[in-house]
Image: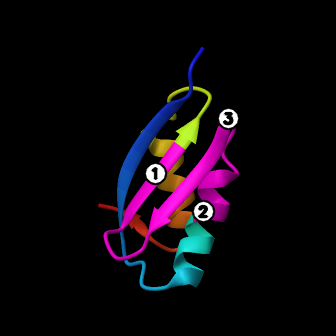
Amino acid sequence: MSAVTTTYAVTGMTCGHCAASVSEEVGALPGVTDVSVDVPTGAVTVTSAEALELDEVRSAVEEAGYRLA
């Protein structure tokens, strides 16, 4: 089975600390193997073993203090 890569738009990130917080929370979700955050665009690209539930990703992003766009 191949990995699934999905990009989400996250609002409110302004710095490296923001990116680290989002990466840590989203990266802790089951099956996630990689998280890449582009602060200027708000793009959070997540690679996981299987597709993630949107609500799980939303909860992780909100736990970090940000919102899915």
The residue segment tinted magenta is 23-46
Which quadrant is the N terminus positioned in? top right
Q: Residues within 10 Å of mark 3 (few under 14, many from 20)?
A: some
Q: How has the structure been colored for display?
A: rainbow
Separation of residues labelled 3 and 2 (CA atoms): 14 Å
Residue topped by disc 3: 31
Label 2 SS = helix
Which quadrant is the C terminus positioned in? bottom left
Residue topped by disc 2: 23
Which tag, 1 or 2, sits closer to the chain's start?
Answer: 2
Label 3 SS = loop
Above or below, 13 against 7 in this view is below
Q: Are marks 3 and 2 in contact (CB under 8 Å)?
A: no
Q: Residues within 10 Å of mark 2 (few under 14, many from 20)?
A: many
Q: Is residue 22 left or right of residue 5?
A: right
Which numbered disc covers residue 4?
none
Above or below, 59 against 16 in this view is above
Residue topped by disc 1: 45
Q: Which residue is pictured at 56% across the width and 27% down the height?
A: 3
Label 1 SS = strand
Instruction: State yes or no: residue 28 in magenta.
Output: yes
Separation of residues labelled 3 and 1 (CA atoms): 14 Å
* Residue 64 makes an appearance in the image: no
Q: Position of residue 65 (x, y in %)?
A: 51, 74
Q: Nearer the viewer, residue 5 or 52?
A: 5
Instruction: State yes or no: residue 39 in magenta.
Output: yes
